[in-house]
Amino acid sequence: MSDLDWIEQALTGARPAAVAALLRYFRDLDTAEEAFQEACLRALSHWPKNGPPRDTAAWLIMVGRNAGVDAARKRSRLEALPDEDKLSDLEDAEGAIAERLDGAQYRDDILRLLFICCHPSLPRTGQIALALRIVSGLSVARIASAFLVGESAMEQRITRAKGRVARAEVPFEAPGPAERAERLSAVAAMLYLVFNEGYSAGYDQVEARAPLCDEAIRLTRLLLKIFPAEPELMGLLALMLLQHSRTAARFDAQGALVLLEDQDRASWDRGMIGEGLALLDKAMRHNQPGPYQIQAAVAALHARATTAAETDWAQIEHLYASLERMQPSPVVTLNRAVAVFKARGAEDALALIAPLEKDLSGYFYFHGARGAFLKDLGRREAARISFDRAIALAGTAAEAAYIRTQLDGLGEGGARAAGSNGVSEP
């Protein structure tokens, strides 16, 4: 491994802790980011000659803090400086900061940084873009490519997100237990949004957006390392791993969507599956079930089935019913209906989704699933109407092409729901 390779890995790994601490010092996202970038430049200059520091995050915090203060001094020579003993590098400042990183302050810094990125005043795309820029350090060009927008448009989006955060005056005090639990929930939701932005990509977008899945998994690992006893974080990471394990099998060579039941299970990543199953088992031992654990349990049933025919659809229906009670949602009910279709037939499934038509009238997967149920019952004209509506609402060319195959097969018997692991997870 070259010097640049290990330095890049070290900087990437230390970035969340360093930026979070610098944000606490300077209380400004732009200043914290600039201070970290200056520290990285100095690392590229010093580390190849002197070797890596004992604690890379602590070194970057110390250097970044001093660089930020120096920059402030240049901007305003009349501004009072901090005491000399706070700036001096004659003592082992790195050691003191490293010691602090092992305590609650480090955990609160990381959580605060992630929480700021998913502030409720920001739209979903703003939350994700800000997290990828500030926490992950992805370039604006790379984020823009993932979202299929121009670099200048993404730069403006991130700038607006920073402005909203600044105007919201997010507090920097260490959160108490109740607020920490609330923040963890918000951060987990934001990380899953990042993952889904990558996982929901069409075939032509996979190369640009797949790295979002990897980054979401990396950040969730970081959060779980900070809070190792949180079963819902275990469930979230398990869910991501189990879903991501199937990535290589989700499209055929022509870019067409391949449903879960038709996928080549030999191409699933068994390492990810093994880790996901182990995390889920560990989470369940806490006996504190939550939405991510239940969704991971659904994914685990698919992963454990050696063939599609062995899938325990009755158990999947039971899990979605539990999720429905815990987190009522038309989409959860739609997912449950797919399991009902597999376990008991189209008539029961169709009855279950009938009340959802108003809420999900603009949802691709509702019309795809409804068309499949109707097709299975031989109601061809009604199925055709649903499939036409699904094509109009398709988010990717692969989704539209799959529904087109269902339309073309209306003269044939039998059908499959548009999404076997929940309607939103082909």
Image (tube, rainbow, N blue to C red):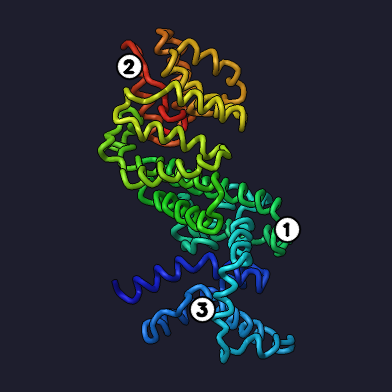
* Most distant residue in the top direction: 378
Q: Residue 346: x percent and y percent?
A: 45, 13
Residue at image mark 3: 59
Q: Secondary structure at mark 2?
A: loop
Q: Which mark is residue 168?
A: 1
Label pair 3/2, CB-CB below 8 angstroms: no
Which corner quadrant of the image does residue 250 belong to?
Answer: top left
Which of the two residues, 248 or 76, is positioned nearer the viewer here? 248
Q: Residue at x 37, y 20 (%)?
A: 416
- Quadrant position of the N terminus in the picture: bottom left
C-beta proximity under 8 Å, tags 2 and 1:
no
Measure the C-alpha gap from mark 3 to mark 2: 63 Å
- Secondary structure found at label 3: helix
Say which mark, if any, is on residue 349: none
Mark 2 residue type: Gly
Residue 121 left/right relative to 124: right
The reply to whether residue 153 is visible in this rendering is no
Instruction: Give, as a three-letter code, the residue at label 3.
Output: Trp
